Image (cartoon, rainbow, N blue to C red):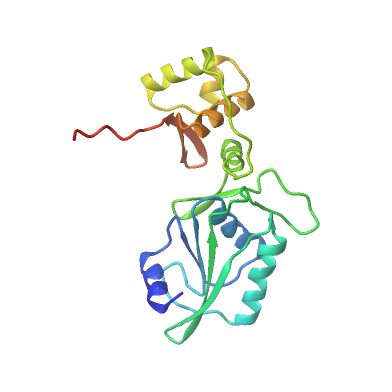
Amino acid sequence: MTRQRLQELIAGGESQTVEFKRRFTSPEKIAKELCAFANTQGGYLLLGVDDDRTIVGIESEKQDVELITLVCSFYLDPPLDAELWIVTLEGKDILVVWVPASPKRPHRVVLPGERPRPNGVFIRYQNQSVPATREMVRLLAAQRPDAPPVTVTIGRRERALFDYLERHGRITVFEFARLVNISRRRAGQILVRLTRLGLLQIHLEGTQDYFTLAQYPSAQNP
């Protein structure tokens, strides 16, 4: 991590892949940010930078590095691998934490000694880390390299879904469940399978997912 690259990250502000923290707040809050990066596109956590991009620096390099290492090892399940750098800007030290998109996702925030919580999975949405829906958690698990292959039968329910999407453009899990008179759980399973096959796309709007038909690039004339 070079000074120039760090300056570019700060100048760009918080985003899908960048989060600022003035200081280390609590292990659970930091775990939430790292979890969201690992479950989405990866990203940088900058400790010692305020929300308005002011460089305030960290107080103890050794302590903050140890705390980040603690979070990655004991507050996330499965544990996370992260790269850490100390970079000096304006005479102040900034701790840069890089978390790549993880092949072991979904990662969950856990408290040492407690069982993983169902709502402990976070993803990155724009410049925020938000709880993942059940469908998103299933999709994350299905994207792991060791996930079993997906199979699906195109029957009455799926045809009703495609017809609805052709007319309305989007559908939620609850709307699909009502449309074909099945449980929310079953509706979510079908939507996730069709998304895995590339027939649908999942979108996050606030705290709710919705699905659309997959968009394919139009053929270009030679």
What is the residue that sits farthest to the left in this orientation? 222
What is the residue that sits farthest to the top in this orientation? 156
Give the answer, above or below, for where 152 lies relative to 30: above
Which residue: 45% across, 29% down? Answer: 199
Q: Which x, y percent locates residue 46?
A: 50, 69
What is the residue that sits farthest to the front in this orientation? 222
Q: Depth check: 216 or 72 in front?
A: 216
What is the residue that sits farthest to the bottom in this orientation? 91
Labels in figure, total: 0
Q: Which x, y percent locates residue 110?
A: 71, 54
Q: Depth check: 180 or 77 in front?
A: 77
Which residue: 42% across, 73% down? Answer: 6
Q: Quadrant of residue 77?
A: bottom right
Q: Depth check: 77 or 149 in front?
A: 149
Give the answer, above or below, for where 140 lies relative to 103: above
Give the answer, above or below, for where 217 lies relative to 38: above
Quadrant containing the C terminus in the rendered view: top left
Q: Which x, y percent locates residue 184?
A: 61, 25
Which residue: 44% across, 51% down? Answer: 126
Give the answer, above or below, for where 203 lies relative to 103: above
Q: Quadrant of residue 192?
A: top right
Which residue: 66% across, 71% down? Answer: 67
Is 141 positioned to the left or the right of 125 in the image? right
